[in-house]
Amino acid sequence: MDAAFTAEQDEMRRTLREILGKRCGPDEVKAAVRTADGHDRELWQQLSQRLGLPGLAVAEEYGGVGCTPADLALACEETGRALLPSPLFATAALCVPLITALGTAAQRSALLPPLAAGGLTAALAVPGPALATALALTGDNTAGPWSGGGRAGGVQARPDAEGDGWRLYGETAQVLDGHSASVLLVAAHTGGFARSRTLLFLVREDAPGLVRSRQATLDETRPQARIQLRDAPAELLGEPGAGAGTGVGAGADVLGALAATGRTACAVLAAEAVGAAGQALARTVEYVRQREQFGRAIGSFQAVKHRLADLYVQVQAARSAAYYAAWDPRQGGLALAQALEALRVTAGEAIQLHGGIGFTWEHDAHLYFKRAAADELLFGPVHRLRAHAADRAGLFASPTAHVKVAV
């Protein structure tokens, strides 16, 4: 394994950091999240056209860059440093892989080029809140009623009466960037209770029967929406026969694609959290160097030095785990757990070390604290991420044979 970054990756990091440093300060972030889109549309177009950020996950044949997950993770580390509100994660990390894996040739040709160029954005809507379960981050997504099943709840799909499409009915919440996305990927159940299976459907933003409303969230930099589908027309993602079998294995290709997407998303989220944690630590170090108490900078006190040193070690360890997961997404769950924990601890210590001013709700330190709390609610919690990784590794599996000890 060669963990060194290439010259192109270093240049992308430098350019992205330069742009975000000028356009994405704390005041600009707070202003952007209060717009109707929840992000700076002009900045998003600049990042899409100049750097091709959404195209990092799109193959070259569809107008993208065709990079590895490591490139997307590296870009998201920089967006995490700035807490950039943008549809990058929802579009590039969640929807593009699913369209690539499951879409027909016509669907890929129609959707991937504009997604790579930033002209379209996409959002993944799963019943819930169950995003972590649907992506198999905290457990097996082939079991349990996370998507409603054939019973009441979730989103139900039925063939259109004319036989050339589908109709969706139901409601989902906590859809990342769902209020502004051009196209929605909706996980819905079809087949009734006996032959129930989960399939993915494409719903356009102008579809009749689609009602979207932005939700009030703890972390405004990661906007969420409530999606209501009232007999809304939809297009099946993939061939009509894909995943349409009966029995336990029905729809296994869709669930497998969701799980594979979740592994890559973990690596991207881990890098994003590491970027935020590193910036929160850097801002805290800068503050304790300037803030004086008893005639000296508070950063000169040994107790403060020890706390900052512990944070530095934790952030660097999380960064190493995130980089490794970018190279091997199978380790994404553990890397995400470590990164989320590092961000939570660092953001909490940042508030403490900023003293009285840090406890005011309007202080910038709370932007990182809110991101840490909200991400753990959406994609964790940390102990469930680690428990699922342990289950997959068989760490606590019952032994198949017992040794009898004579008494």
Image: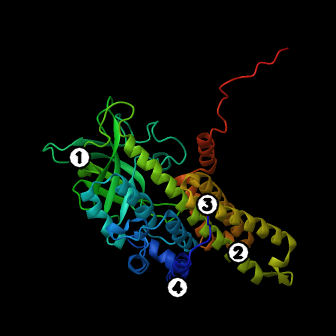
Earlier in the chain: of badge 1 and badge 4, it is 4
Give percent across and percent down for residue 52.
41, 75
**Residue situated in front as seen by the camera: 359 or 65:** 65
Is the C-beta separation of discs 4 and 2 under 8 Å? Answer: no
Earlier in the chain: of badge 3 and badge 4, it is 4
Instruction: Report the residue at 62% width, 67% height from top.
Output: 3
Extreme residue in the left direction = 162
Residue at the spot of label 3: 324
Instruction: Report the residue at 38% width, 79% height from top.
Output: 49
Q: CA distance from mark 1 to mark 4?
A: 45 Å
Residue at the spot of label 2: 284
Is 249 placed above or below 14 here? above
Residue 400 in view here: yes
Give percent across and percent down for residue 66.
42, 67
Amino acid type for the residue under numbered disc 2: Thr
Earlier in the chain: of badge 4 and badge 2, it is 4
Residue at the spot of label 1: 167
